[in-house]
Amino acid sequence: MAKVITIAQQKGGAGKTTLAAHLAVALAQKGNRVAIIDIDPQGSLTHWHRIREEKLGEGYTGLVFSALSGWRIGSEVSRLRKQCDFIVIDSPPHTETEARTAIRAADLILVPVQPSPTDVWATKATLDLAKAEKIPVKVVLNRVPASSRLAQTIAAELTDLADATLGSRVLFASSLLEGRTATELEPTSPAAQEVKTLIKEVLALVKDKDEEAPAKAAKKELAEA
Ligand SMILES: Nc1ncnc2c1ncn2[C@@H]1O[C@H](COP(=O)(O)OP(=O)(O)OP(=O)(O)O)[C@@H](O)[C@H]1O
Ligand SMILES: [Mg+2]
């Protein structure tokens, strides 16, 4: 059964689509079957996937793609859950209703935030939504400048912060323009490294408790033997 990761943030331009594409591709590169769902009427992720199809060939993007309006999410997620390992949902800014549906469907919510006061203030609404639905949530600092004290000050203001952060790097934008991502085009770049670090953290967060159980039991058995 697939794990659903929703990228949500009411503030526009925080990096939702950039994060969704990078997360999906990085998970697929690890051998997972990954679906992406675009519920943003702006269709940025849809646009990216279309370029990806042009470059790599239809059916060869390594991702299952769907675009739909938010209220249909529940049924689409139930359908895709059976055939995928991960579902990544990119959601629109400024709409509480759509965001709520996408948040409800999730096993983990990632909230990209740029290190600026207004972005941080806007984040509370998304965090409150996630908390109200009792879904695990992590805030991902995005577009962090190379040397900025501000980012640290801002980080101190935020709760539920992921350890991983994404820097302000041209490759995050330029790779999307080609229908690709940083981890594909420049796997050893700092941008790609940051994505890989984030993926590790994400995988640990969505790991099944029941997957851990047999391993723990085996360890205990060994210790007792
Ligand atoms: N880490 C980054 N480094 C450099 N540029 C970035 C980074 N993250 C996002 N961007 C750029 O910031 C802009 C907004 O990013 P993106 O479209 O992913 O945000 P969004 O939250 O999906 O926006 P919207 O709310 O409109 O859907 C884009 O031009 C994108 O290329
Ligand atoms: Mg977007």
Image (spheres, helix red, strand yellow):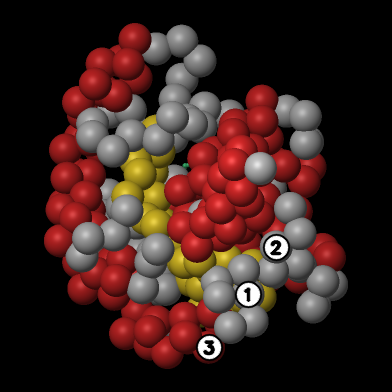
Say if residue 22 shows up in the picture: no
Quadrant location of the N terminus?
Answer: bottom right
Q: Secondary structure at mark 2?
A: loop
Q: Residue furthest front?
A: 225
CB of mark 2 within 8 Å of CB of mark 1?
yes
Question: x, y (%) of residue 150?
Answer: 30, 15
> Distance of mark 3 from mark 2, alpha carbons?
17 Å
Choose the circle earlier in sequence order: 2 or 1: 2
Indicate the secondary structure of the residue bearing disc 1.
loop
Q: Position of residue 169 (x, y in %)?
A: 58, 29
Quarter of the image where the C terminus is located: top right
Q: Which residue in the structure is indicated by mark 1?
A: 84
**First reached walking from the N terminus: tag 1 or tag 3:** 3
Residue of label 2:
32
Instruction: Name the residue at 39% across, 50% down.
Output: 110
Q: Provide the residue designation for mark 3.
A: 79
Which element carries disc 3, helix, strand or loop? helix
Badge 3: how crowded within 10 Å, few (<14), some, or many (20+)?
few
Q: As shown in the figure, which amino acid type bears the numbered disc 1?
A: Cys
